[in-house]
Amino acid sequence: MLMGAYYKKGRYIGYFFWVGAILTSLREPLEQMGANVPWIIIYALISGFVMNLLQAVYYRKAGFLASLTLRLGHYILWHMLLGVYVEYIELT
């Protein structure tokens, strides 16, 4: 982003942001490639990429707090509430 601010006097800063957002959105799902089942790999890639890119969209439109709220809301729903549901309802 800093390079984009100085390149051609900031004329292409939007392009720098979106290229950076796409590349960083791909980084997390590619690091979590542990399964050998193809549909799990595809699901992890698509859902991880979409979630990260959506967070970048919210950051661009509404700022850091909106992006953080989206991520924390996802963690509460997926990791905490689903974990409680599985532990106390599905496994009993």
Image (cartoon, rainbow, N blue to C red):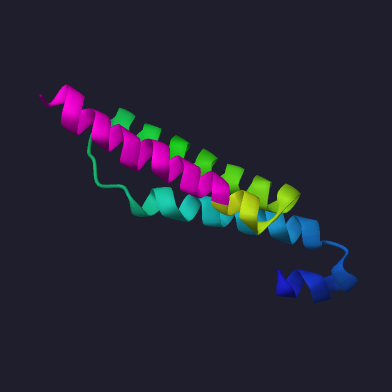
Left or right? Give the position of 2 relative to 49.
Answer: right
Q: Position of residue 16 (x, y in %)?
A: 72, 61
Q: Residue at x 19, y 24 (%)?
A: 89
Q: Magenta segment, which residues?
A: 69-92
Location of the N terminus by quadrant is: bottom right
**Towards the viewer: 72 or 33:** 72
Which of the 4 image quarters holds residue 87? top left
Q: Is residue 16 above or below residue 35?
A: below
Is residue 23 among the parts visible in the rendering? yes
**Towards the viewer: 24 or 66:** 66
**Towards the viewer: 35 or 81:** 81
Left or right? Give the position of 21 relative to 76.
Answer: right
Q: Residue at x 73, y 74 (%)?
A: 3
Which of the 4 image quarters holds residue 92? top left
Q: Position of residue 13 (x, y in %)?
A: 79, 62
Q: Residue at x 32, y 41 (%)?
A: 80
Q: Position of residue 25 (x, y in %)?
A: 53, 51
Q: Position of residue 71 (x, y in %)?
A: 50, 48
**Towards the viewer: 3 or 61:** 61
Q: Is residue 3 above or below residue 61?
A: below
Q: Residue at x 72, y 74 (%)?
A: 2
Number of callouts in the render? 0
Which of the 4 image quarters holds residue 83? top left
The furthest residue to the left = 92
73 magenta-colored: yes
> Magenta part mainly helix, strand or loop?
helix
Is residue 22 among the parts visible in the rendering? no
33 magenta-colored: no
Left or right? Give the position of 60 relative to 76.
Answer: right
